[in-house]
Image (cartoon, grey):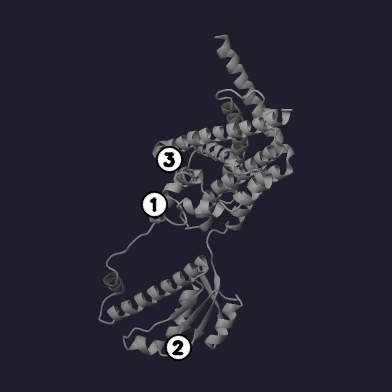
Amino acid sequence: MNRILKRIHLDAGNFYYAMMREFKNIFSDVAVLFSFILVSTVVSFLYAYVYSHQVLTDLPVAYVDMDNTAYSRQFIRMMDQTEQVQMNHAYAQFPEAVKAFEQEKVRGIVVVPQGFAKKLQKAQQPSVSVYTDGAYVLYYKQVLTAAKYATAYMSAGIEIKKIQAKGNLPKVAQIERAPLVGNAVNLYNLNAGYGTFLIPVVLVIIFQTTMLQAIGILGGTMRENHKMVELYPNANHPLGMLPIVMGKATTYLIISLCLLVYMVGFVMPYFQIPMRGSLLETVVYMIPFLLSVVYLGLFLLNFFRKREDAILAIMFTSVPALLLTGFSWPTDAMPWYLQALSNLVPTTLGAKGFVSITQMGAGISLIQKEFLWLWLLCIFYLILATLTFKRIYLIEWEGQEKQNKP
């Protein structure tokens, strides 16, 4: 019994010492303080600010009216009345419009061909050419949407006039033109805002990237200075590294939860990003995610022998992590091996659950599969992190033994 109590006391002491030591290391290392805490707070705010307008409106678009008739001018006015574009750049020749497009004065070009009105009067189908930059998806979408709206409304107006010409009342003509009326409702993202779609996922990516960098920098410093044996002399016994690893993880968990409350409680409401779920459930769900990231970072110390290694390696992981979440491209459309890899990256399940709670108002009971999988991932990386620290400890201990030999 005394042996068990002594072991509990020893492990509790190692846990507390590792936790407080990590706090001291974080707040005394300028690089870690900047890359972890300051970057998390500032970057999350700046990302939300950049996308705070949510939807692109009044994009400048050039037009070339080669027909110069009442019908062609009506089409231009209809496009101008949409919220997406502003038809405020008129050009007589197409090359002039192209030059303005290349100089980025306009984001698209609309060309109404000669004979546009004559074809309409002859019940023929004229065409309108729309040019926009496919390299910028948001610009492309807005210009094309405005052109589709104008085309649809003008076509409907012409058809209704033809039906009225047969002696039908305007209301009857409208019903005959469109016997079925659809009513599209955007769920969750009511305004189809890009910020509402992107920011919650980006916040999760920020957590993973900044934490992995901080852990890698401090871990690389520890390996460079060979401080493991000196700092934790009582760890060389079965499972002796487990409380040390868990103590370090607790430090990052406490700081990350404070950052999470800042992001959810201040950044999202300030920029009018919806928060439909419970703050408590959000925090509870994110605990296994944050721990998984910490243990993953401690495991990656196998590959970081210097503090600079982490900075160079981790900074390139944010974009692949974003792709693997399935928000920019559906996970089901990815190859099977990428789907399998995505389940091993904490941000995949972290982002899905975070979005489900904050944007869709789901409770943990509705996403319990993801919640349980995160805990399994947490345990998996905890085991790997413990084995990693044990390996590093033994390497340093053997190195010191060799140096001490005469």
Place residue 216 in its image quadrant: top right
User: Residue 54: horizontal and vertical position, in percent?
Assistant: 54, 58
The image quadrant where one finds the C terminus is top right
Mark before the other along the chain sequence, 1 or 3: 1
Q: Under tag 3, what secondary structure?
A: helix
Q: Nearer the viewer, mark 2 or mark 1?
A: 1
The number of discs equals 3
Q: Which mark is residue 370?
A: 3
Residue type at mark 2? Thr
Distance CA(mark 1)–CA(mark 3): 19 Å
Distance CA(mark 2)–CA(mark 1): 56 Å
- Specify whether residue 249 is in view: no
User: Would you place residue 217 above or below residue 254 in this image?
Assistant: below
User: Residue 103: horizontal and vertical position, in percent?
Assistant: 61, 77
Q: Which residue is mark 2?
A: 69
Residue type at mark 3? Glu
User: Would you place residue 67 above or below residue 253 in this image?
Assistant: below
Q: Which residue is mark 1?
A: 336
- Residue at the top extreme, as displayed: 1
User: Residue 28: horizontal and vertical position, in percent?
Assistant: 74, 38
Q: Nearer the viewer, residue 254 or 385?
A: 385
Q: Nearer the viewer, residue 353 or 129?
A: 353
